[in-house]
Image (cartoon, rainbow, N blue to C red):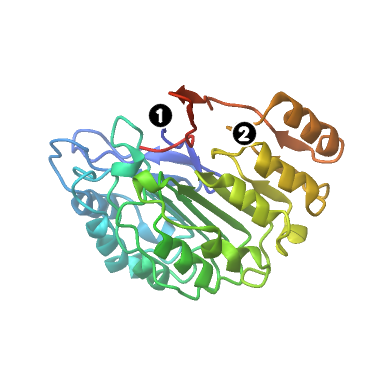
Amino acid sequence: MISELQNEFHDLPVVQFPTDDATPTPTVEGPVAWRISADTYDAEIEWPEAFAKFRAAVDPASVTAIVVGSWSEPYENSSAGVVDALVAAADELPALRALFIGDMTVEDCEISWIVQSDLTALLTAFPRLERLGVRGGTQLALSPVRHENLRSLVIESGGLPAELVRAVAASDLPALTDLELWLGTEEYGGDSSVDDVAPILSGEKFPKLTRLALANSDHQDAIASAVATAAVVPQLRALDLSKGVLTDTGAESLLAGQSLTHLESLDLHHNYLSSGMRERLQAALAPSVAHLDLDLGDADEDDYDGTIYRSVAVGE
C-alpha cells in the first residue's frame, strides 16, 4: 500500500502545479520536479489540458523533471493520453531528464488498478532522459529499446507482466546504473519467472549496473537462488530483494552462494525468515555490509486449515 506522494524526485523537491485558475503558479528558486495531475474523480479538466496549462505558465525549456500524478479515473482510463501529450511536447522540453508516471496513493487508486499503457514512445521521444519511474503494471507495455542515456529505471507494481520484464531485459541501456522491478504476484498479473530476469542477472546486458532490485515477488526464494550465483552480483553495490515472500530457503541460497560482503547495501525487509536465519545473516553480513535491512516489516503468515499463506508487501 502506498499512502504518501513523493516529495522528492531526481534529487529535487516536488512542487505541485495548480490547475485551477484561482491559484497562482508557485514561485520557485532553482530546478524542481513539477507534479502535474488531474483529479482522480469527477475531474473538471483532463490531464492533457492540465499539462497545456503548465506549459503556458512555466517555461517548458527550463523543466528538468516531471512527476505525473493522477489522471481522470485511472482505474478505467489508461495513461495513453498522458504519454501522447508528453511525446507531442517533446520539442518544448529539451532539458527534461527525469519523468515519473503515476504518482498516486491508495486514496487515488490501488497500485494494481492503475491502468498504464505502452511507454516505448517516451524513451524514443526523450533520448536525453536519465530517469524513468512508473507505478502500476496493468496494461503496462514496452518494446525492447536502445537508449543511450537512461541511468535509472524503476517500475513499481503489484504484478508485472512477463512480457514487460522480458522487454526490459532485452533492452540495450548502456548507461543504466539503477534497475528496480517490483515483480509482484500472479493474482495481479505478475506472471514472470526467473528465466525472464536471467539476461539481467547474466551481467552482460547492463555493464554499468550498480544497484539492482528484484522485489515484491511471490517467488522471491527462486529469485534469491538465482542471484546467489548470478554473474551480475560482483559489480553491484546495492542489492534489493525486499517486499517479497523470502523464506529461509531463499536466504540459505544467499548464504551458500557467492560472497555478498562487497555490497554497501542489502535490503531484505518484509520477509518470512526465522529468527535463527536472521541471526545467521546478521553474523555473516553485518560486519561488512553497511546497510543491511532484515526487518520483518508487516510480513505475517496466515495459517488456514494447515495451509500457510504468505503475501508480498504490495499486491492490490
**Residue 70 or 316: which is nearer the viewer?**
316
Q: Residue at x 63, y 68 (%)?
A: 206
> Mark 2, residues whose alpha carbon is within 10 Å: few (<14), some, or many (≥20)?
many
Ranked by sequence position, the earlier of labels 2 and 1 is 1
Which residue is under mark 2? Answer: 269
Residue 306 can be seen in this image? yes
Query: Which residue is identified by label 1?
Result: 3
The three-letter amino acid code for the residue at tag 1 is: Ser
Marks 2 & 1, CB-CB < 8 Å contact? no
Task: Check the image and report above or below for 38 versus 170.
Answer: above
Quarter placement of the C terminus: top left
Residue 19 in the figure: left or right of residue 209: left
Task: Name the amino acid type tagged 2.
Answer: His
Q: Position of residue 219 (x, y in %)?
A: 53, 47
Instruction: Determine the residue positioned at 52% across, 26% down.
Output: 301
Q: Secondary structure at mark 2?
A: loop
Report the disc number at residue 133: none
Would you say 232 lies left or right of 27 here?
right
In the rendered image, the residue lying farthest to the right is 287
Q: Is residue 225 above or below residue 177?
A: above
Foreground residue, 133 or 309?
Answer: 309
In this view, the residue in front, 122 or 286, is 286
Q: Quadrant of the N terminus?
A: top left
Q: Dot 1 surroundings within 10 Å: few (below 14), some, or many (20 or more)? A: few
For the point 61% across and 27% down, the residue is 296
Q: Secondary structure at mark 1?
A: loop
Distance from label 2 to label 1 (Cα)?
A: 18 Å
Q: Position of residue 234 (x, y in %)?
A: 77, 59
Q: Residue at x 73, y 64 (%)?
A: 231
- Residue 71 placed where, x, y %? 24, 45
Of tags 2 and 1, the one toward the viewer is 2
